[in-house]
Amino acid sequence: MMSPLGKLLVIGFGPGDMEHITKRALDALSESEVIIGYNTYVDLIRPLLNGQEIVRTGMTEEVSRAQEAVRQAEMGKKVAVISSGDAGVYGMAGLVYEVLMQKGWRREDGVEVEVVPGISAIQSCASLLGAPVMHDACTISLSDHLTPWETIVKRVEAAASADFVIALYNPRSGRRTRQIVETQSILLRYRDPQTPVGLVKSAYRERQQVIVTTLEDMLNHDIGMLTTVIIGNSSTMVYDGLIVTPRGYQRKYTLDATEQALKPHQRLRTEAEPWSLGAQAGAAPAVPGPSASVAATAVAAQARPQAVAAVQGSPSAAQAGSAPASLAAEALSRLAAGGRLPDDASARWSGQTPAVSASGVGAAAGTATGGFGKPALFEVGVSPGVGNKKFTARQMALLAEIAGEDGEVEYTPDHQIVLRVPCADPEELVGRLRDERLIVMPIGDVFKVKACDFCNMEKDDAVPVAEHLQVVLGGLQAPKETSIALNGCGMACYGAVLEDIGIVYRKGGYDLFLGGKKFGRNAHAAQPVAEGIPGEQITDIVEHIIAEYKEKGHPNERFHKFFKRVGVVAGFRHEDAPATVEVNAVCGD
Ligand code: SAH
C-alpha cells in the first residue's frame, strides 16, 4: 500500500561535479518535490533541478534543516535533503534519523526514508592524489563544534599510533585555525616528518587544488574549509608526484618479479601469512618454504608486561648497571621472558639474578596456548654463546628433538639458528634449552648482539664486553631489528663494520662504527665515529646510543636511517656516505 506520507530522500551528491554523482542520486533529485540544503550545495546541483521548490539554509542550521525536511515529508511531500560527498559521512543522514527518532518514528508506518550513497571526500580526494588510502584508514573531523576537542585528540592519537592512513575532514575554518596545528604536532610524535601528506581542496570542483607535501611541511600550504588532508601511513610513498600506499605486506608478493615466489593458491595459506590471526592461533607450517617464515613471538611479547611489573617492583632493578634506568628494567624483564644471564656477567652487573630469573620464569608461563586449544608457535633464536660458535652434539640433538616432526630449525642469512615449534609450555621449553647451556633470544624487531668467535677464544679480551652487551641489550625491543656486533681484533673478520652498530677491539681500546647497512644493493659500511674508547666506557656509550634510538626512532626505522635523520646520536655526528646505487627495496627496508 502506498504511504499517504511523503518520502525523505537523503542524497549524497559526491564531490560536486556532474560526472561523479550516482545515477540513483540523479533520479532521486528529479523525483523529489522539495530540495533542502546548504546554499552552496544547492548552487552546485542547480543544473540538475527541474522546478523543485528550494529551501535554502545557512551552514549552521543543520538541525532546523532536518526538522523542516521531516515536517514537509510528513505533510506528504517527497523531500530531498542534500549533502556533499556521502550523506552518511559528516552529512545529513544521521541528523534526519535523529529528528525522526525523537518523534517516535517507526519504519513500518512512518515516512519512508532512503539514504542515497555518494562518493565521499576521502575517496574523491584520494583519487586525485594517486592511491594514498589503499589500506586501513579512518576519517577524523577536526571540527570541535559538536565534538569535544579532547575526544578528537584521543582519536588522532589512536589513529596515529595504530598506523592508520588518516583523512582529516573540516581541517580548518576562518575561526578554527589551531586544530590543524595541534593535530600536526600529535602526528609528528608518532610518524616520520617525511610522511607523505596530500592536501586536496575543492576536489572535482572549479577551484580544485592538489598538493603533495610532507607531515613536516603541510602547514606551509593553504588549508581551508574545503580541504581534505590525507596523511599516509608508515609505508606510504611518493612516486612522480603521486602518493601511493602499498596494498599489503610486501613479503607476500614481489613487485618487480614476473614469477611470483608464491603461486596464487599458496598465497592464501596460513603459512604464507605469518602475520594473520590464523597463524597466531597456532596452525603449524604444513609446507615450510623459503618465504613461509612463521612469526609467532607472541610468547615473549605477552610475557613481557607481567615481567616488567615484576622487575619494576624491585628497587635494585632501576639501579642496575650503568644503563639508563628504563633500559635496565626492560633488559631484566626481557631476560626474565626468555634470555639467559651468563653466570658471572649477571653477578657483575646487577647481583640480583636469582630473583629476576624466578619472576621471569613465572611470567613466561602459560601464555603460549593459541585459540581453540591448539598450541601456539613459539619462535626463538638459540645460540651456544655470544662468542662461542660451536654447538655440542647434545645441543644439536636437543634442538632436533624439540623441533620434532612439526617444528623447524632454520639457519638465517644472519648466521642465526631459529627454532620454531608449536608449543604449549614455553617455560618448560626455555628451561630445557637453558639446561643445555643455550642462549635463548626473542626474534623480530629486537637488538641482537653478535660477536666473532675471538679466534677460538684465544683473543678473548673483549669477551666480557660482548657478554655485558648481550645481557643488557640482547633481545630488547627495537624500532627495527638491529645488530650490535663486536669483533675481538682489528681483522674484524666477522664483519662488525658492516652492521648497524659495530665495535672492533684493538689492543688499547674499542673502535666504534655506526649505521652500516649490510644487505641490499646500496649496502654500505658503517661510519667510523670513534677510536680507542677505553673498556670501561664502551658499554655505557653503546647503551646510550641504544637508549636514544629506542626513544626517538620511528617504528620500522632502521638504525642507519635514524642516524642520518637525527644527525647526532650520543654526541656522534652523522656524515653522508658517498652516494651508492638507488634501490627500490621491495623486501622490508
Ligand atoms: N559529507 C561529506 C563531508 C562533509 S564535511 C563527504 O562525505 O565528503 C565537510 C568536509 O568535507 C570539508 O571540510 C572537507 O574536508 C571535505 N570535503 C567535502 N567535499 C570536498 C571536496 N570536494 N574536496 C575536498 N574536500 C571536501
Image (tube, grey):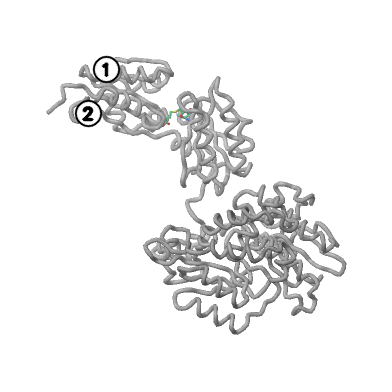
- Residue 484, compared with residue 144, is above or below; it is below
Q: From where the camera sits, is residue 326 visible? A: yes
Percent coordinates x, y for residue 336 in the rendering: 60, 63
The reply to whether the residue tagged 1 has its Cβ within 8 angstroms of ligand 1 is no
Q: From where the camera sits, is residue 442 visible? A: no
Q: What residue is at 72 percent from the left and 54 percent from the top?
A: 319
Q: Which sits in the foreground, 247 or 94?
A: 94
Quadrant for the C terminus, please. Answer: bottom right
Q: Secondary structure at mark 1?
A: helix
Q: What residue is at 50 percent from the left and 67 percent from the top?
A: 378
Q: What residue is at 75 percent from the left and 65 percent from the top?
A: 348
- Residue 249, compared with residue 150, is above or below; it is below
Q: Secondary structure at mark 2?
A: loop
How far apart, in angstroms, are the residues tagged by discs 2 and 1?
15 Å
**Residue reaching furthest to the left:** 1
Which residue, given by chain and number where applicable, does mark 2 sit on?
Answer: 106
Q: Which sits in the foreground, 339 or 497?
A: 339
Residue 343 found in image quarter: bottom right
Q: Residues within 10 Å of mark 1 (few under 14, many from 20)?
A: some
